[in-house]
Image (cartoon, coloured by chain):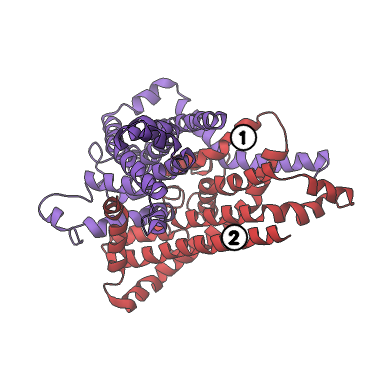
Amino acid sequence: MGLWLSLIVLLPLAALAVTSTTKGWSGFLDAVTAPAALSALGVTVGLALLVAVANVIMGTLLAWVLVRDDFPGKGVADALIDLPFALPTIVASVVLLSLYGPDSPVGVHLNATRPGVMLALAFVTLPFVVRAVQPVLKEADVAAEEAAASLGAGNFTIARRVVVPMLAPAIVSGAGLAFARAIGEYGSVVLIGGNIPRHTQLASQYIQQQIEVDRPVNAAAVSVLLLLIAVLSLLVLRLATARLLRRGAEQ
Amino acid sequence: MNPSTRSRWSLRIVALGYLAVLVAVPVLMIVWRTFQHGLGGFVQSISTPAAVSATRLSLLILAIVVPLNIVFGVVTALVLVRTTVPGRGLIQAAVDLPFAISPVVIGVSLILLWGVDGWFGLFPRHNIPVVFAFPGMVLATLFVTLPFVVREVEPVLRELGTEQEQAAATLGATNWQSFWRITLPGLRWGLTYGVILTLARALGEFGAVIMVSSGIAGRSQTLTLLVNSRYTDAHNLPGTYAASTLLMGIALIALVLMTLINRKGAAQ
């Protein structure tokens, strides 16, 4: 079993790490600080952060509506949330292009623009926050909210002082997963993003390009950095969630 | 929190509007575009020689990846739950690793390991190509699907406990017998769920596979690569929509099966 795990996952990653430093530490730094690499990384992290924020707001709202509200077709809406995970990423690209691409029937053309990339990233990360918040909201004791209301708190105050703190760990954890997914995303942006260097080119597309022009060391270095950002953000996320949970328990 | 009817309506409209603009309308759009000229065009598009060979290749990869993942997944879950080997935390982390890695990075690391200049470069140097050939595509798919069976079987195994196995042992069953007659049947729903996730991901994987494929139509294209090349190289929009709808149909079937299994699990 250990052998299998090494052969499939660990050895390729070891080869990646070793290759990234074959030209020494300075070679690694040169590769990741090349202007095109830096801008691809900047665009990736920037757009992924924006998408994570969008997920915090819309994901929480969607979870709230799906748990606390009631309307015909709620089951369908709930099932739709899982679709982005089930759909192949390249199909996500085609699906979005058919509505927001060059022959858009509604006249919205987002191909090869940053909003287009964000749309694709928002599509593939949609389930993370919704599915993290939903169970917490379902389990939640409405007594605290009712108590606050009977003490005269308005809806906004209840949302800010009771509901959001209760949901915070789930929201943060969902948003972190969405961010980690977004920074590595490739398939869903490959057709809609346009791959324009310094504008819509993401880190994954830059890496792919470096392999194509036969610069494996550059590709490996940026890959390692991307991987480190993902692992680091997941680590920070775990600590942040644990802290929020502790604070919640103390109260 | 008990918002007024008006704010309840506005929250509902904003949330559902987002879902519609992002998911529902684009998905309906592509279904409509696929079938707007009837079923004939769709059937024709998914039965061209390139499409048939892509379907065959995708199925062949599944036929290799799924059994390997079942064996590895069950064994790993057994090790993680039932033994106290040191370094179980590390195994856990390594199993989850594929979830955190970009598909393109996975492709690059396979190229660097199995390529001509890689550590295992002696295979391609002796005319056994791995990357930019079929074995590379299998390796890429194995990498991305590795966590699913382990992650689904592990909690079920924990829940299952060892009481029944101990009872079987006192009645004289060998370890092998109790594994086949008690442990494995107990795992069936978790295992099925993991297999469906594996199937869906293996069929839908794009980034990692395109990195290590030579991408020749009719030979080394899977269904997702076919979608990409029909759009980018051939500008064949009806063909792109048809192949996408086919993949979407399979994804929907997977979703329905998962929901059914979840209900079954909840009912038990």
User: Which mark identifies residue A242?
Assistant: 2
Q: Quadrant of residue A64?
A: top right
Q: Is residue B121 left or right of residue B3?
A: left
Q: Is residue A92 left or right of residue A219?
A: right
Could you tell me which residue is drawn at 27 percent across and 44 percent down?
Answer: B138
Q: Quadrant of residue B220?
A: top left
Q: Which residue is mark 1?
A: A77
In the image, residue A30 lies at what x, y percent? 35, 75
In the image, residue B36 lies at what x, y percent? 48, 25
Nearer-the-camera pick, B12 or B27: B12
Q: Supply the letter of whichever chain is purple.
A: B
Q: Do callouts 1 and 2 mark residues in contact (Cβ within 8 Å)?
A: no
Say which chain tag 1 marks: A
Nearer-the-camera pick, B47 or A170: A170
The kind of residue tagged 2 is Ala
Nearer-the-camera pick, A60 or B35: A60
Say which chain tag 2 marks: A
Q: Supply the letter of whichever chain is red.
A: A
Q: Mark yes or no: residue B206 visible.
A: no
